[in-house]
Image (tube, helix red, strand yellow):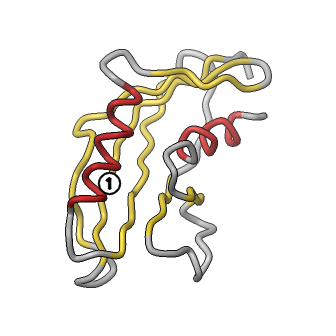
Amino acid sequence: MDKAQAWHSFLSGFGWTAYDENTVPDEAGDEYITYESAEANLGKQVLLSASLWKRSTSWKAITQKAHEIAQSLGYGGTTVPFEGGAIFITQGNPFAQRLQGEDDATRRILLNFSVEFLSAY
């Protein structure tokens, strides 16, 4: 697994399908995650975001998903290994922010992350 695959793996671990924001299929479904993808070397912090998307008129389920992801990071963050290193992921500031969805029946929450790639390449 490389850096990009590790980042995708982390975001795919919450029961919703995750897509790079540049490759979301038309048939993505009623709940999914889109994310930015970038890489850096050791000691370089990268600020990345992901969006939760939920087809609903209620904020309840999407807010619960944001809380689930926040809890997985806790206060100290988490690491995801990849070949030759790991990525260290913590909550960005602000971590979760409600945004306008595609229409009145779609809810969106933007999540901000601080990511450090712990590898020499």
Please state which of residues 54 and 20 is positioned toward the viewer in this rendering.
Answer: 54
Residue position for label 1:
110
Say if 49 sits above or below 90 in the image. Answer: below
Relative image position of residue 38 (x, y in whole percent): 58, 43
Nearest the viewer among 79 and 21 is 79
Residue type indicated by callout 1: Leu
Quadrant position of residue 81: top right
Q: Residue at x 29, y 59 (%)?
A: 61
- Quadrant where the N terminus is found in the figure: top right
Rendered residue at 33%/23% (across/down) = 74
Vertical placement of residue 20 versus 116, above or below: below
- Label 1 secondary element: strand
Residue 74 placement, left or right of 16: left
| Residue 76 point in image, percent of width and height | 36, 15
Q: Is residue 1 left or right of residue 18?
A: right
Is 56 on the left-hand or right-hand side of 19?
A: left
Q: Position of residue 121 (x, y in %)?
A: 74, 23
- Quarter assignment of residue 113: top left
Residue 71: image quadrant is: top left
